[in-house]
Image: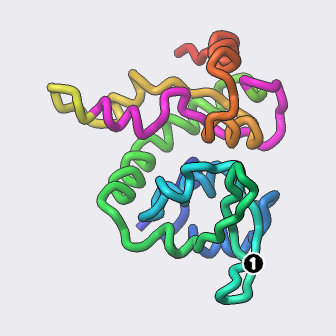
Amino acid sequence: MKFSLGESIFGSKKSAIDTIKGNLSIDMVPHSLLAAAITLHSDHETKLKHFKSFVITTNKEWGSKCFGIESIDGTVEPFSIEACFRPATQHGNEMNTLRQETYQQCQYYKANVLQVCAICNSSKRLEIDHKINFIDLVFNWKRETEFRPFQEYHKENAVLQLLCHSCHFSKTFGRISTDLMKNAFDKYAFLD
């Protein structure tokens, strides 16, 4: 069964874990992929409460390298990629399914827009960003009184933009001002 995580689609959940662990480097794994993984962790709200950045650290218990979360106070807490994927939560499974349903729409968008970051104009390591957070789209879709397929709702309501890896990471964790985001949206809005 295919498994989506952020913008990436893997052959399976195991393949996603192996890919992330096999590239144990902050430069090799897109931060959007780590951000998507950590949101599946059962304790993600606590872990991300004072988030500053992802880092590579050593798990003192096991003595091995792993990803960590650096807090704004400078402390680093290691986290296990495997823990992000177990136990499979209903929320995580649902988000994975809905992202798979919209994958083609996102790839179509990416292929048909100016290939620069909407914030800094970089053309390197571009990633698709939902200007309205994906989870908010899902929540709003569920609140609709008339049921319709999420793929249809996403096509009508998602506001997508390309961001470079760095800007996408900063936007995901709230470090880019809303005025700057509005200017970027006005400049690179996608038109059918």
The structure residue drawn at horizontal position 64% and vertical position 10%, both measured from the top left corner, is 186
Q: Is residue 7 visible?
A: yes
Residue 107 vs 49, above or below: the answer is above
Q: Nearer the viewer, residue 9 or 138?
A: 138
Number of labels in the image equals 1
- The image quadrant that residue 118 belongs to is top right
Disc 1 is placed on an element classified as strand
Residue 21: x %, y % from top left: 67, 74
Residue farthest to the front, as pictured? 73
Residue 120: x %, y % from top left: 81, 26
The residue tagged 1 is 58
Q: Nearer the viewer, residue 133 or 123?
A: 133
How did the renderer colour the structure? Answer: rainbow
Q: Is residue 9 visible?
A: no
The structure residue drawn at horizontal position 65% and vertical position 32%, both measured from the top left corner, is 111
Residue 143: x %, y % from top left: 23, 30
Image quadrant occupied by the N terminus: bottom left
Residue 46 vs 182, above or below: the answer is below
- The image quadrant that residue 191 belongs to is top right
Circle 1: residue type: Thr
Q: Residues within 10 Å of mark 1 (few under 14, many from 20)?
A: some
Residue 58: x %, y % from top left: 75, 78
Q: Nearer the viewer, residue 47 or 152?
A: 47
The structure residue drawn at horizontal position 18% and vertical position 32%, both measured from the top left corner, is 147
Does the segment drawn in magenta span residue 124? yes
Does the segment drawn in magenta span residue 158? no
The structure residue drawn at horizontal position 75% and vertical position 61%, both measured from the top left corner, is 55
Residue 42 vs 35, above or below: the answer is below
Magenta extent = 118-141
